[in-house]
Image: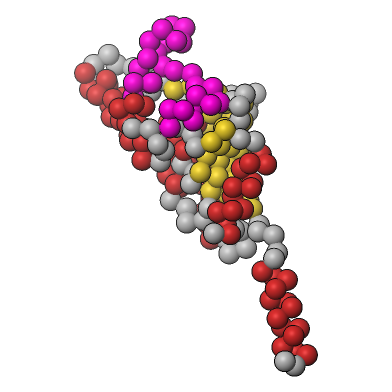
Amino acid sequence: MTKNEKKTEKTTATESKSKPKISCLTVIGEIEGHVESPEQNKTTKYEHVIPQLVSIEEDPSVDGLLVILNTVGGDIEAGLAIAELIAGMTKPVVSLVLGGGHSIGVPLAVAAKYSFIAPSASMTIHPVRTTGLTLGARQSFEYFRKIQQRINNFVAANSHITADRYNSLVMTTGELAMDVGTVLEGKEAVDVGLIDSVGDLGSAVKKLKKMIGS
């Protein structure tokens, strides 16, 4: 073997051991959609997140994506739009719920290829709601039912829980004051099949690196 061949072999070995490049997306506060939230609110704006996700997917130097969630929920259409983009990425994606992954934050958490939740974190599952005036007509209720069905189906398609089981958690009575729904804490979210594992940042990064290397 010549000196040049040895040098090439050494360079190739060094490159193969290089650390994978991981991009991080944070979803915090309220997920803002077409209507702007009050200035004092912490928000995640979907018009900022969408191009960021496209850029990550198209960037050959990025090997995987870590999604960190601590959100109260927010705009349903915006949340589902982001979740669909995450679910459709070809690169490895791991999510980690810290603090809370409530309401429309649930589809965002399960959209990743693998999901974690911190032991102290929680997820609130409740029916679709609206703020403001809603006409009390049959068509209005049917519209909300269809939106809820879209959420149920997305969650079921991207986790280990069935749509019927998820809907039963949505419609649980007696757990939330003046509302219906369910609060799942840490391991409970894993036990029902919503989240894959209980873990922390180290667990999420380790899993993502393993997925990148496989």
Quick check: 23 above or below 194? Answer: below
Q: Closer to the camera, 121 or 26?
A: 121
Q: Nearer the viewer, residue 3 or 134?
A: 3
Q: In x, y percent, where is residue 83?
A: 46, 41
**Is residue 178 located in the magenta-colored stretch of the structure?**
yes
Which residue in the rendered view is the most extreme toward the front?
Answer: 1
Residue 131 seen in the figure? no
* Span highlighted in magenta in the image: 167-193
Quadrant assignment, res 19 = bottom right
Residue 137 sits in which quadrant? top left
Q: Is residue 135 left or right of residue 124?
A: left
* Residue plotted at (46% across, 28% down): 191
Q: Measuring 62% from the left and 53% from the top, which residue is drawn there?
A: 209
Give the residue furthest to the left: 138
Q: Quick check: 141 above or below 46?
A: above
In screen coordinates, is 206 left or right of 91?
right
User: Where residue 147 sits: x, y (%)?
Assistant: 32, 30
Identify the image quadrant of residue 170. Answer: top left
The residue lying furthest to the right in this view is 3
Front residue of 199 and 155: 199
Measuring from the top left, give residue 114's x and y in whole percent: 51, 43
Identify the image quadrant of the C terminus. Answer: bottom right
Residue lying furthest bottom = 2
Answer yes or no: is residue 184 visible. yes
